[in-house]
Image (tube, rainbow, N blue to C red):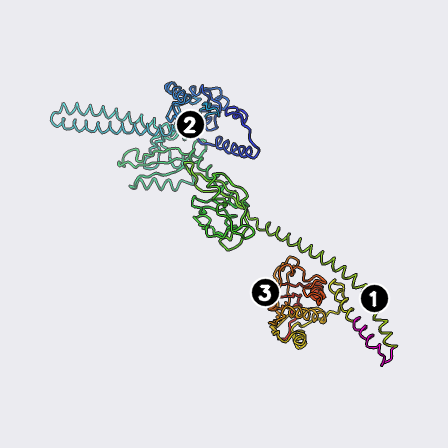
Amino acid sequence: MLDRRSTRNWFGKRTIKEPRLEELRLEEAQLRSIFESAAFGIVLADANGQTHECNPALERMLGYTEGELQTMRIGDLMHPDDAEETERALHALIEGELEEVNTEKRYIHKDGSIVWVRVIASTVPNPSGELALSISMIEDISARKSAEADTDLANIGRKSAEADTDLANLGRKSAEADTDLANLGRKSAEADTDVTRRYATELIETAGAMVVGLDLNGGIQLFNKAAEEISGYTREELMGRDWYEVVVPRKRFPAAREEFERLLAGGMPQEFENPILTKSGEERFIVWRRTALADPDAPICLISIGIDVTELKQAEESLRHERDFVTKIIDTSPIGIVAHNHQGEITFANAEAARILGLTRDEARQRYNARDWRITDYEGQPFPDEELPIRRVKTSGQPVYDVRYAIENANGERVYLSVNGAPALGESGEWDGMIASISDISKLTRAEATRGVLEVELLQSQKMEAVGKLATGVAHNFNNLLTAITGYGELLLAKLPADSDLRPDVEEIERAGARAAEVARGLLRFSRRGREHLERIDLNSVITDMETLLRQVIRSNIEITTVLADDLDRVTNNQSLIEQVIVNLILNSSDAMPDGGKLTIETANLRLAEPRFLRSDLSLPAGNYVSLAVRDSGIGMDEETQARIFEPFYSTKGPDGTGLGLSTVFGIVTESEGGILVESAPGLGSTFTVLLPSIPNQRSSP
């Protein structure tokens, strides 16, 4: 056998880059597999007709081993009468006078028998243009030749019989006129009939198919040589025995006997496949053509001609197993496999591809037009039509790899794909579509996106934690100073007479200290270091009780509307902290509407069936929540402002703002294991939505 190095020497030395080398190795493996598993013989020979390589099919066809064939020339395999013509054809191929040889020849089997073959030969040039090798595909056509010969012999016998009949009629007419001539004619006819009978017997005996004759009871009365060779029985062993008891497999006995009786009853002849059991116990598949004879008194009433198709059946079974094996591999593949025709329609999709594309089983096996699917890149932008795999494969004729885009499949689901595609070629080598493998990388893509969100959330959390630590330190130091200031203020106020001119100043110092203490408590709440009394709170009741106060603290040109949900869940929190959240949100919305507007306070129950990301730095676990939404029609905020509104000391109000209102809200809500979501755009107002865990089965009154 030629190895990889020797094949390279025939076709010239080449320098191949590593990716292409891997492709060539794959192609070589595929071609080697085809060469080894081909059902017809393949032989490579040099310019002198010396055999260099042949496949297993040729070895089986001629009975030689691989090593024996490699020591022989093509002419050594030929029938002597065909060798000279073969040498001339090979010479014409090598000299370039012929591009191809297509002929039928006789080869000699190792056992000396003749094997009729059909030979298709051509040459393979090397890179310098010289014709280096001849390659021949060899098909065994002995069965066909034998059938043709049998047909020719049968035609000769029929014509001879017709001629004999004419002679018999002529003899009968002559006998009526002249008795002597009639007797002479009768004797001549009898002689001719004997010749015809002997010829028919020889024809049956030498036929390449089984010929079996049965009597009315199924007893064997005729058994030719081919039947002996196929069954392993001799004529003497079977004569007179019941065909169905001896040769027909037990499981097929009823069907075979039924066919026998149908023909005897006058049924029309037809092909009938029924196996036989050979003497060795092997089951051989035979296709029968059976005919009932008209004379019921004849010793033979049924003639059966059978052709052994066992090898064909075995080949079909092997192909079926191979097809089933490949089908199972494709159907169970974790990678989607799709076939497109030249119009871009899906003509096949395996189970995984059908799942990814949202196709039913019927749609996956028929022509499905996917052109209406919305196709974008991963960011949602339109995907260029010329970059689609089928367009690139059709244009270049080359495979494409890892083309990534997203589709909205037949179910309307958004799926992120990675696609590899290769051209599918028609019988003439023209482009006829594409075979694609598709991978659903939606989970991976979403995981990468989630990772990005988590990274942003982590950075924001670290940022807020750092600010919280700073606020905690400032608050504690501030409290220490305030303790001294307010303490001395109280002592001084106690010592001053009621009518002292200094008393108003000292009282103002005391009030300023109280306000400063509230600022310190706000810093501690933001940093989650505050310790408050917790209780079950009816959020609707808190809002209703505060509504009068809220109308007093905002401008009169702002309209307040409350939309409170019936049967609202209760929350566990500190009522003063919840009141502070509401007041800070209302004041923030009021400041966003300097020219007046509409302010809406809304409550609702919310059920999260699974964890949800509300924004890059906010995620909530699954569970029950109460939502408090404060919506205004104010000036709104851009994205840069929204990213910083919960930072301590950040304010858009200039010197009038402390920057602690929304940061305090953030601290209280986060301390309560809740979250706050902001929706806003310049000129379109803002909505702050607070989500707080609710208490199961604890509902407020309407």
Residue that numbered label 2 is attached to: 138
Disc on res. 366: none
**Helix, strand or loop for disc 3:** loop
Disc on res. 683: 3
Sequence-wise, which precedes: disc 2 or disc 3?
Answer: 2
Q: Nearer the viewer, mark 1 or mark 2?
A: 1
**Magenta span dominant secondary structure:** helix
Residue that numbered label 1 is attached to: 481
Residue 154 lies, in percent from the top left, at 29, 29
Residue 683 lies, in percent from the top left, at 59, 65
Sequence-wise, which precedes: disc 1 or disc 3?
Answer: 1
Q: Residue furthest bottom?
A: 499
Q: Is residue 611 visible?
A: no
Relative vertical location of residue 427 with respect to residue 670 in this rendering, above or below: above
Magenta region, residue range: 496-513
Q: Left or right of 456: which side holds 284?
A: left
Residue at image coords 65%, 61% = 641
In terms of depth relative to the viewer, which is nearer, 120 or 286?
Answer: 120
**Helix, strand or loop for disc 1:** helix
Specify the amino acid type for callout 2. Answer: Ile
Sequence-wise, which precedes: disc 1 or disc 2?
Answer: 2
Specify the amino acid type for callout 1. Answer: Leu
